[in-house]
Image (spheres, helix red, strand yellow):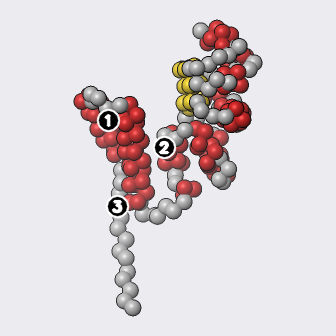
């Protein structure tokens, strides 16, 4: 049998310059955009960013075969584009390193709570929202019982120190007037 020795290529991929180019592409797209929906734009943006990340992984000198092998920066970039609930559910108990990354994460969080069962909603509130309330910048609540779960008692609203956007949709809450009085 004839053996062939694979040659190792060193490809240098500049992630930060590629990210700058990506932003320029996004800006030029936004100026000429007419009828493209917001969801398509978001999907394309996430796809492009993940493409850059994975191009770097493929072209790096080391082969990355496990998510644990990714650098913290790449992990943060991936976490930033995924729903917080699924990030915690998927990565939190994987290993100590990822657990500490998620625990010490300083990135602002945008949380959307919509179609979840009451038990999942309570677990989500206990393990994610309450533990990270000081990092939440956007909170979208469209689940009929979630406002009562999150803001019961109303004084818990004071924990959301970085909250910039609060979206309440399809909510019937006995605390709603008190919550709105607290924030406004």
What secondary structure is marked by label 2? helix
What secondary structure is marked by label 3? loop
**Relative side of 163 to 159, left or right:** left
Residue 169 lies in quadrant: top right
> Residue 65 at x, y = what percent?
51, 62
Which residue is drawn at the image coordinates 68% and 50% (left, top)?
93
Q: Which of 138 and 74 is in front in this view?
A: 138
Q: Residue 77 carries which label?
A: 2
Q: In what quadrant of the picture does the N terminus appear?
A: bottom left
Residue 37, compared with residue 67, is above or below; it is: above
Q: Do the residues labelled 2 and 1 touch (CB within 8 Å)?
A: no
Q: How many labels does the image show?
A: 3
Which residue corresponds to mark 3?
11
Which residue corresponds to mark 1?
26
Query: Rounded to the nearest whole Å, what is the CA distance between mark 3 and mark 1?
Result: 26 Å
Which residue is drawn at the image coordinates 43% and 57% (left, top)?
57
Query: Rounded to the nearest whole Å, what is the CA distance between mark 2 and mark 1?
Result: 17 Å
Label 2 crowd (10 A; few <14 / some 14-19 / many >=20): few
Q: In what quadrant of the picture does the C terminus appear?
A: top right
The nearer-to-camera label among 2 and 1 is: 1
> Residue 180 at x, y = what percent?
62, 11
Report whether residue 143 is seen.
yes
Mark before the other along the chain sequence, 3 or 1: 3
């Amino acid at each position: 049998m004839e053996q062939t020795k694979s040659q190792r290529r060193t490809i240098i991929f500049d992630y930060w310059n590629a990210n700058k180019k990506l932003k320029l592409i996004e800006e030029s797209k936004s100026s000429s955009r007419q009828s493209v929906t917001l969801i398509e734009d978001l999907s394309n943006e996430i796809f492009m960013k993940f493409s850059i990340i994975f191009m770097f992984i493929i072209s790096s000198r080391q082969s990355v075969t496990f998510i644990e092998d990714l650098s913290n920066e790449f992990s943060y970039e991936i976490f930033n584009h995924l729903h917080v609930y699924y990030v915690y559910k998927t990565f939190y108990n994987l290993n100590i390193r990822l657990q500490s990354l998620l625990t010490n994460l300083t990135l602002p969080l945008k949380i959307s709570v919509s179609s979840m069962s009451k038990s999942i909603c309570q677990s989500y509130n206990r393990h994610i929202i309450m533990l990270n309330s000081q990092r939440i910048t956007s909170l979208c609540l469209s689940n009929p019982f979630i406002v009562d779960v999150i803001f019961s008692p109303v004084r818990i609203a004071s924990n959301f120190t970085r909250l910039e956007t609060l979206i309440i949709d399809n909510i019937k809450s006995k605390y709603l007037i008190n919550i709105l009085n607290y924030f406004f």
